[in-house]
Image: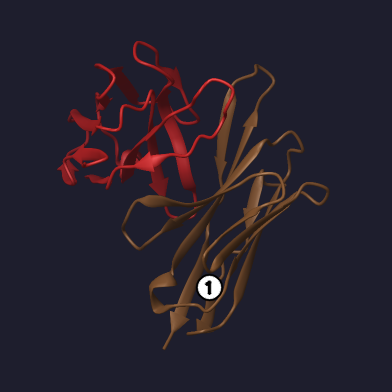
Chain colours: A red, B brown
Amino acid sequence: NAGVTQTPKFQVLKTGQSMTLQCAQDMNHNSMYWYRQDPGMGLRLIYYSASEGTTDKGEVPNGYNVSRLNKREFSLRLESAAPSQTSVYFCAASQVSRGRVTHEQYFGPGTRLTVT
Amino acid sequence: RKEVEQDPGPFNVPEGATVAFNCTYSNSASQSFFWYRQDCRKEPKLLMSVYSSGNEDGRFTAQLNRASQYISLLIRDSKLSDSATYLCVVNLFNAGNNRKLIWGLGTSLAVNP
């Protein structure tokens, strides 16, 4: 049982290049999230998907797009990378049951992205 | 005032010590609360959920004080393996009835031999 997996683990891009970060979960959770973590800034939500077929912007969506491909997979795309997008990116999943708001989130191991 | 505030530390304690962290939140409508643990260069992992009057899990005790708007985490008999950053997380519903998770910046703990 892998939980939440992310690929790649590390990536170096040049300014203007594009890439897609992949995330998959095998916990059958309905909600998935993309965060970035920067020193002194904490975790900031980029986009989330409450359920298959829906996506919503989080706190810092500019420069990113997402796709909830199916219940298992949620990808994050950088169309034209900028140095300000150098960060550690975490994908997470959670199960929100009717009548019980828990938001206990399970994270993938992260992608360390450097944009030069 | 930040929505969720934590003392960044670092807290340096010897093995076997008892250590406590507080986390204050500004929105009284906050509904649920969590402590996560994050090791250096690793992902955050859920440590404990904190509901109503709090809960205990082995050496860890989490408390919620709604009147003063803070949660606490108490670690008894500290182990070297407890060295990590502890993140406070608050969940609330905003004006549009959309849920929002707010993450603190974390408190760093170093347990020394």
**Residue A32, picture quadrant:** top left
**Residue B22, picture quadrant:** bottom right
Rendered position, A102 above or below B1: above
Q: Position of residue A86 (x, y in %)?
A: 30, 44
Using the rendered image of the protein, determine whether residue A75 is visible from the camera's viewpoint: yes
Rendered position, B85 above or below A47: below
Quarter of the picture containing the C terminus of chain B is: bottom left
What chain does badge 1 belong to? B
Q: On the picture, is B111 further left or further right than B100?
A: left
Q: Residue furthest right?
A: B67
Q: Position of residue A64 (x, y in %)?
A: 33, 25
Residue at the location (52% across, 80% down)?
A: B12
Q: Residue furthest top?
A: A53
Within 10 angstroms of label 1, few (less than 14), some, or many (20 or more) residues? few
Q: On the picture, is B59 further left or further right than A110?
A: right
Q: Position of residue A60 (x, y in %)?
A: 46, 31
Using the rendered image of the protein, determine whether residue B105 is visible from the camera's viewpoint: no
Q: Callout 1: helix, strand or loop?
A: loop
**Residue A45, picture quadrant:** top left
Q: Residue furthest bottom?
A: B113
Three-letter residue code for mark 1: Pro
Residue named by callout 1: B10
Residue at the location (17% across, 30% down)?
A: A17
| Number of numbered discs | 1
Q: Position of residue A78 (x, y in %)?
A: 26, 28
Residue at the location (69% across, 36% down)?
A: B30
